[in-house]
Amino acid sequence: MLRWADVLKYARYSNPEPPRRLVLTEAEWAAQLTPAQLAVLRQHGTEPPYRNAFCRTYEPGRYVCAGCGSLLFDAATKYHAISGWPSFTQPAARNALSYHFDDSHNMQRVEVRCNVCAGHLGHVFPDGPAPAGLRYCINSVSLRQEQDAPPHP
């Protein structure tokens, strides 16, 4: 389980090694992503709060990166944080995300990116629920939800 101290260590020193890397040109990204996805994932934008796809959905499944399909979060870690964006308590794996200090907009935050394609996802804050106390505040447009497969008869 990741804690705030782990997040700060990764942002300050070195992020975990990704399971693989995907590097595309900006033209290749533009051809593959919608304008909204491009604005968030590649240009570090933010979608409007409360009017996004996954803000109020809690179905079982997994959330993958809309850019590269890498597993980022499990729906079991999603919770209602009243932040306006989907919130999660933990990433799917320790090396699913990379962490970067972000002092834009006169704020000090920790940005989270997909560790495979470096797509901007959102930010992580130390005000989440116990036991880890993390709140991953993520743009819906940077995610794609995959439903759990039904069990075999």
Image (tube, rainbow, N blue to C red):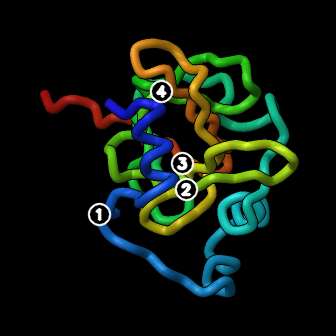
Residue at horizontal 68 percent and vertical 43 percent from the top: 109
**Kind of element beneath mark 3:** strand
Which of pointers 4 and 2 lies earlier in the amino acid sequence?
4
Residue at horizontal 34 percent and vertical 57 percent from the top: 16
The amino acid marked with disc number 3 is: Arg
Please say if 38 is above or below 126: below
CB within 8 Å, label 2 to label 1: no
Measure the alpha-carbon separation of dots 4 and 2: 15 Å
Measure the alpha-carbon separation of dots 2 and 1: 14 Å
What residue is pinned by disc 4?
Answer: 89
Q: Position of residue 66 (x, y in %)?
A: 55, 57
Residue 90 versus residue 29: which sits nearer the camera?
Answer: 90
Residue at horizontal 32 percent and vertical 63 percent from the top: 17
Which of pointers 1 and 3 lies earlier in the amino acid sequence?
1
Count the numbered circles shown: 4
**Kind of element beneath mark 4:** loop
What residue is pinned by disc 1?
Answer: 19
The amino acid marked with disc number 2 is: Arg
Of circles 3 and 2, which is in front?
A: 2
